[in-house]
Amino acid sequence: MDLVESGAGEDVRLAELVAALSLGIDLGFGQPMEHVLRQCLIALRLADLLGLDERDRAVVYYTALLVNVGCHSDAHEQAKWFGDDIALKSGKYRYEPRSVLGAAAALRMVGAGSPMLHRFRVGLEFTLGGWREIDGMISNHAVLARDLAGRLSLPQDVSEAVGAAYEQWDGHGWPGRLRGEQVPVAARLAQLAEFAEVAHRIGGTRSAVEVARRRSGRQFDPHVATVLCRSPQVVFDGLEAARTWEAVISAEPALGVRLTPEQFDAALLAVADFVDLKSPYTLGHARAVGRLVDAAGAALDMDPGESTLLHRAALVCGLGRLGVSNAIWDKPGPLGAGEWERVRLHPYLTERMLDQSPSLAPLGAVAVQVRERLDGTGYPRGLAGGAINRPARILGAADAYQSMIEPRAHRAALAPKQAGDLLCDEVRAGRLDAAAVAAVLDAAGERRTRARDTPGRSQGPAGLTGREIDVLRLLARGRSSRQIAGELVISPKTARNHIEHIYTKTGASSRAAACLFAVRNGLLE
């Protein structure tokens, strides 16, 4: 297949991109792929039973697809408390929100996978402030989902609905500012559809009806729950047999939103920045790799179509990371064999997320090869030589270089020269393409020269001082206020004051939101 001729997303519907991202949300919750797509269909069927017009159905459609999109943004903190962030989130559907049983199940996971002494210490810290931090995380998930909806230029009604995604009918949701009819109808439908999908998939129609009936008037809108309970066949009929991807894409209300090439690139960048929040060690990774491959492709005289394909593949090549726990990504020690197998899967998961869309599949065909190596020692398929396409060779070199100069849980960031030497070693060993590595290293050298020649600023974006930018960089990399104090030789109280000033100036309410600000303003380079 000619990757460029197959189209690199020149005529893509926004629904396809959001639906592809939803498959990553499934993985991050330990759910089978297309869980979110099925909940979208359920929400639309409920909307039809309620007689919502086409405009309101469009809000329901995108709200249902985006409702949990922010839940990976603090996976680092989730793993810190509970060991495995995906295992934690997979338990969401077993218990009613804020229930005693749910709280007990979460407590049993505190410090999971660690030695007993460490579990005791983490448990003690959790009892002192952990529940408050978890409450803040859930509220911030909705804030970040609202941010992404805005970045994707979705209607304001969608932003408001995903911003209220965790509110409940009885007012005991997150952040707990809305209740009853104050909660947007799209949020009410999406929440019921989400839990009903899991109950139906596991226990059938009777189980889904029981969940709706039992939580009616508390978590769920009683009128919407009654509609589901009265017409379960209409809501669930044929759900298992449906070709879910095609059904969801064709169900997009009104005329499908088609993106211009410029809008598509902006949407991909917004999604890439969002995905990179998965770990403090990968912040801004995709956009940095995108810049490297742009310059490398130009140096290699790639034609415009191939250069566009390469740039877009760079932005999506990390999507599969959503399906791997931060207990692995953020592990400070060596990985076990089973953990390595999960890591080796992530390019394949990226391809799986993209391959159902004719517009996105060509990007996946490049991105899946980002970790393949010319001698056949790469993954996920162990391709060798000519089986690795040209854009993937450049992408592999750029991704490897950028990864080396970024910090990781098990090592500090490498100096650019050291990273360059290691890439050249890979060429000599027959693993990386010589021309691709040379072009990437030239591009990296130009980037460093530009950064060195750029005059320093006495004041950063949003009025941040130089010291506040230093603090923000460390905060974004997952450092606690105490660790920031140690690295910058200041008191913990001063570090906390700087963090408060950063949040105030940037409008951020969480570390993840501050991270997005830092990435979008180029403060991590």
Image (cartoon, grey):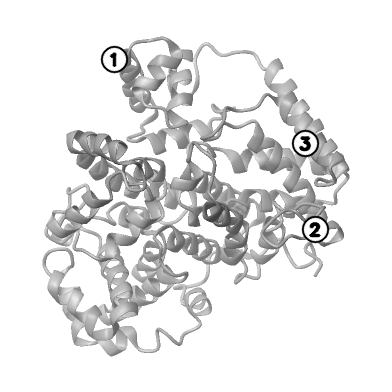
> Residue beneath label 2, please?
388
Q: For residue 210, which quarter of the picture?
A: bottom left
**Picture coordinates of residue 222 (x, y %)?**
14, 72
- What residue do we see at 77% from left, 64% from top? 3
Residue 9 visible in the shown view:
no
Please state which amino acid type lies under the numbered disc 1: Lys
Judged by depth in the image, the label closer to the viewer, 3 or 2, is 3
Residue neighbourhood size for the residue with mark 1, other residues' Cα within 10 Å, grouped as few (<14), some (14–19), many (≥20): few
Pointer 3: what residue? 423
Mark 3 touching mark 2, by CB under 8 A?
no
In the rendered image, residue 304, in percent from the top left (x then y), is placed at: 81, 51
Distance between the alpha carbons at the discs numbered 1 and 3: 42 Å
| Amino acid type of the residue tagged 3 in the rendering | Leu
Image-quadrant location for residue 117: top left
Q: Upstream in the sequence, badge 1 or badge 3?
A: 3
Please say if 280 is above or below 335: above
The residue that disc 1 covers is: 493
| Horizontal side, residue 480 vs residue 27: left or right | left
Q: CA distance from mark 3 to mark 2?
A: 18 Å
State the residue in front, 208 or 175. Answer: 208
Q: Position of residue 62 (x, y in %)?
A: 41, 63
Quarter of the N terminus within the rendering: bottom right
Label 2 neighbour load within 10 Å: few <14, some 14-19, many 20+: some
The local secondary structure at tag 1 comes to helix
Earlier along the polypeptide chain: callout 2 or callout 1?
2
Q: In front here: 53 or 46?
A: 46
Along the polypeptide, which appears first: circle 3 or circle 2? 2
* In front of the other: 248 or 255: 248
Q: Residue at x 73, y 26 (%)?
A: 418
**Height in image: 207 above or below 274?**
below
